[in-house]
Amino acid sequence: MENIVLNITIGQRKKSEAFLDFYKKQGIALSLGTYGHGTASKETLDMLNIGSTEKCLIFSFMTMDKSKELLRLLEKEMALKTVGVGLSFTVPISAIDSMKNLKYLINNYDESKESEGYIVETENELVVVVANRGYTEDVMEIAREGGATGGTVVHARGTGQESSERFFGTLIGAEKEMIFIVTKTETGRSIIKAIKEKAGVDTKAGAMCFSLPVNDVAGLYTE
């Protein structure tokens, strides 16, 4: 079976339609879009000549071979190598509920193709932080102490069983914020450790964090 990845693109909100059109032209069967905002300071925005931190997030399923081709095209056609435009990366999918849904998500999926094997050791990773709403700046300040250069925030609302309602240090149904940070793998460990120690589930921020391997990335900017 071919390796399937989830491609995540984070870009300027004003370019959301352009990104979606790009994916459509590349034959991607399904792209899901939402909005968030970045965590860069005003000084950083002024330095990079970026007028807003509003972001779009686009999630798309594809084969690993397709993702490598797509990332190269994104850098060329959407100028992802330009600082502040955005970044795009892939995360391996370990399971899916049915072959029928897989064929729906992936155009011309070839189920007879042998897998080349997932990449175990990766240079980059995606750190995902789930925190109580209103504590994003505090969490990001701590994340920067761990080596993060920035992140993207998405508003969310938790749901869960009554027996788990205090899992995040407050009601599961309360409003949350998810922070996505793409970073070098070794830096990701430091970020998770810093957040756990200073903004973990036993604090008012109630933050829980985990990381996912990133196979390939376009537009990642590190100092």
Image: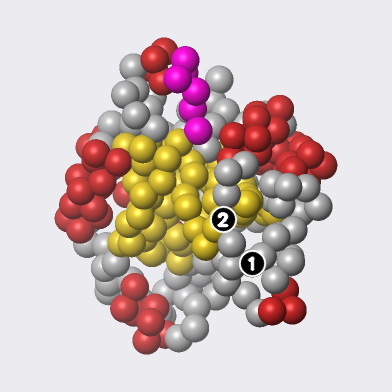
In this view of the protein, can residue 186 be seen by the observer?
no
Q: In this view, does 108 lie above or below 7?
A: below
Q: What element carries label 2?
A: strand
Q: Is residue 174 above or below residue 106?
A: above
Identified at 49% across, 23% down, the residue is 41
Q: Who is closer to the viewer here, 198 or 162?
A: 162
Distance (Cα) linking label 1 and label 2:
9 Å
Identified at 38% across, 64% down, the residue is 61
Identified at 42% across, 40% down, the residue is 37
Residue 87: give x, y in percent of width and height. Answer: 41, 39
The amino acid marked with disc number 2 is Lys
Q: Mark 2 points at which residue?
A: 176
The amino acid marked with disc number 1 is Ile
Tell whether 165 sits left or right of 137.
Answer: right
Q: Who is closer to the viewer here, 119 or 180?
A: 180
Residue 217 circle label: none
Identified at 47% across, 52% down, the residue is 155
Question: For the image shown, how many numbered marks are present on the structure?
Answer: 2
Q: Who is closer to the viewer here, 171 or 79?
A: 171
State the extent of the magenta-drawn residues as a range: 39-44
Quadrant of the drawing holding the C terminus: top right
Tell me if mark 2 has few (under 14), some (14-19) or many (20+) residues whose alpha carbon lies within 10 angstroms of its own.
many
Residue 23: give x, y in percent of width and height. Answer: 25, 54
Do the residues bearing badges 1 and 2 touch, measured as CB atoms within 8 Å? no
In reply to whether residue 133 is colored magenta, the answer given is no
Q: Is mark 1 on a helix, strand or loop?
A: loop
